[in-house]
Image: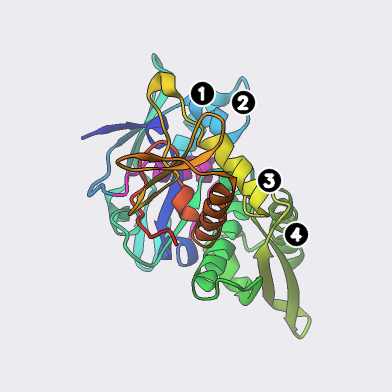
Amino acid sequence: MKIVEIEDSKNHIVKKHNDLVNKARYSLSEDGIKLVSMLIAMINKDDETFQEYHIRVSDFTKLKGSSSKNDYETVHKIIKELLSCPVKIGNLQANFIASGEYKEGTATAVFEISQKLKPYLLELKKDFLEYNLKDILMLKSGYVIRLYELIIQQWREYKHYNKNSKSYTFDLDVEELKTLFEIPNSYLYKDIRVNVIDKAKQQFKEKTNITFDYEEYKIGRAVKRLKITVKENNKGSNDIFANKKSFINHIRKEYIPNPDKNHFPIIVSTKQGDVKINITGEIYLSGDTVVNYDNKQADKLWDWLFDLVKNKPELLKNPNEKNLFSTDIN
């Protein structure tokens, strides 16, 4: 069994079957969901079986953006939680992990993912959700993270067929939401509104690439469903597609080469060659020969790249390994 460490998953892409988003019933803490997401991000797209996944406590706290004197105790608690809170899909019940062990000497936690989840995490060719791990690491609350996945899955699916649309509206059944998130029966709708819906609305606006509004629909006095309207968030901290300038700044930050380490990140691979930037941030096409551009040509290439990945953002998922996408530059 291959050993995989969190830094080996340089792109940190979370990829899961849609059923694990909109049909799975489970309730995990914020830290529990974030750790599971890190494990999923460590899966290689070509893997046919799960590996042994190692996460250093320091990497876990660094990625989720917080640390304390109790980080080691937190990891212990998460392992216990993941071994006692199963995910349910149809008639299947399985824990996210088959085992979890904290190694005292290396301050590392070692995990094996449950084999029952292979159809939902391995060799996915269709009907899946894919997003960058950083999109959820700044969110506070397990419910908020789950709602982000539900809404972004609906949004991405709609945008796939309606690329120029600025918004999308869909219905969300309150009882179905309670079932999927395993929200306690003691929660009244007003509790769900305050602790899930409104909290998510505020956090999405401040921290993610989408935002949403909602309307309540009642039967009698009871709110039974919500009409969710989602749209791109040009103010979210993770939105690199607000405009071309934001996009270029992101590329120049994430894809800058390091000649000393012979590291020249590929932005997109095309039939003509690999699109890269040099150490001064100038864009160029690298094939059998290096093609440099004057300002007008470079601007045209930036325009093409921006339009391409805005409609297919997963192309920018890994600045540290070759992107297998191939297309033509017009």
Residue 209, horizontal then vertical, whole percent? 64, 54
Along the horizontal axis of the image, is 276 left or right of 113? right
Q: Residues within 10 Å of mark 4 (few under 14, many from 20)?
A: some
In space, the residues marked 2 and 1 are separated at their CA atoms by: 8 Å
Badge 1 is on which residue?
58
Task: Give, as a three-letter code, the residue at label 4.
Answer: Asp
Residue 21 is covered by the magenta coloring: no
Which residues make up the magenta segment? Answer: 25-45
Secondary structure at badge 2 equals loop
Q: Determine the secondary structure under disc 3.
A: loop
User: What residue is shown with label 2?
Assistant: 67
- Tell me the amino acid under the disc marked 2: Ser
Looking at the picture, tell me which residue is in the foreground, 4 or 281.
Answer: 281
User: Can residue 83 be seen in this snapshot?
Assistant: no
Pointer 2 or 1: first along the chain: 1
Q: Which residue is mark 4?
A: 198
Spatial CA distance of label 4 from label 3 is: 19 Å
The Cα atoms of the two marked residues, 3 and 1, are separated by: 24 Å
Work out whether 160 lies above or below 209: below
Please give the count of numbered marks on the rendered protein: 4
Q: Earlier in the sequence, mark 4 or mark 2?
A: 2
Q: Of 318 and 17, which appears nearest the observer? A: 318
Residue type, numbered disc 3: Ser
Name the quarter where the N terminus is drawn. Answer: top left
Marks 2,1: beta carbons within 8 A: yes
Say what secondary structure mark 4 lies in: helix
Local SS, label 1: helix
The image position of residue 28, as x and y in percent, is 53, 48
Q: Disc 3 designates what residue?
A: 237
